[in-house]
Image (spheres, rainbow, N blue to C red):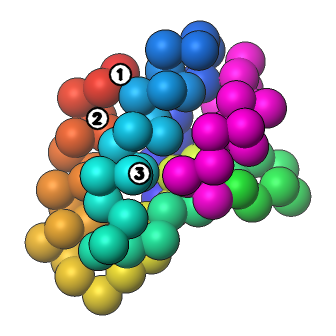
Amino acid sequence: MLNYNLDSVQAANKLVQLCEKYHEDMDIDIVHGRQVIDGRSLLGVFSLIGHFVTVNPIGTNNEKIKEFEEELKDTK
């Protein structure tokens, strides 16, 4: 799980694009409090703008998960 600051529309858009890129390799949940949103849901992610969220990649390919995590760190 990784923390991510959705401080702008641009940050939310980058997160959704990154989740779309990896959607065949894993599911990615965006968690804020008790809300869990699919990372590919543009409207769902946009509803969390202004909050810190937790990004939770779920899959069996550890290489792809690490690759996703590195790309996510680079988008900040």
Q: Are marks 2 and 1 in contact (CB under 8 Å)?
A: yes
The residues colored magenta run: 38-52
Label 3's element? helix
Query: Is residue 46 highlighted in magenta?
Result: yes
Mark 3 or 2, closer to the camera: 3
Residue on which disc 2 sits: 73
Q: Position of residue 38 (x, y in %)?
A: 63, 59
Identify the mark at residue 76; answer none if there is no mark: 1
Identify the mark at residue 19; answer none if there is no mark: 3
Q: Position of residue 16 (x, y in %)?
A: 48, 40
User: Nearest the camera: 35 or 45?
Assistant: 45
In the picture as drawn, the residue positioned furthest to the right comes out as 34
Q: Position of residue 13 (x, y in %)?
A: 49, 26
Q: Tell me, yes or no, if residue 30 can be seen here.
A: no
Q: Amino acid at mark 3?
A: Cys
Q: In which quadrant of the rendered image does the C terminus lie?
A: top left
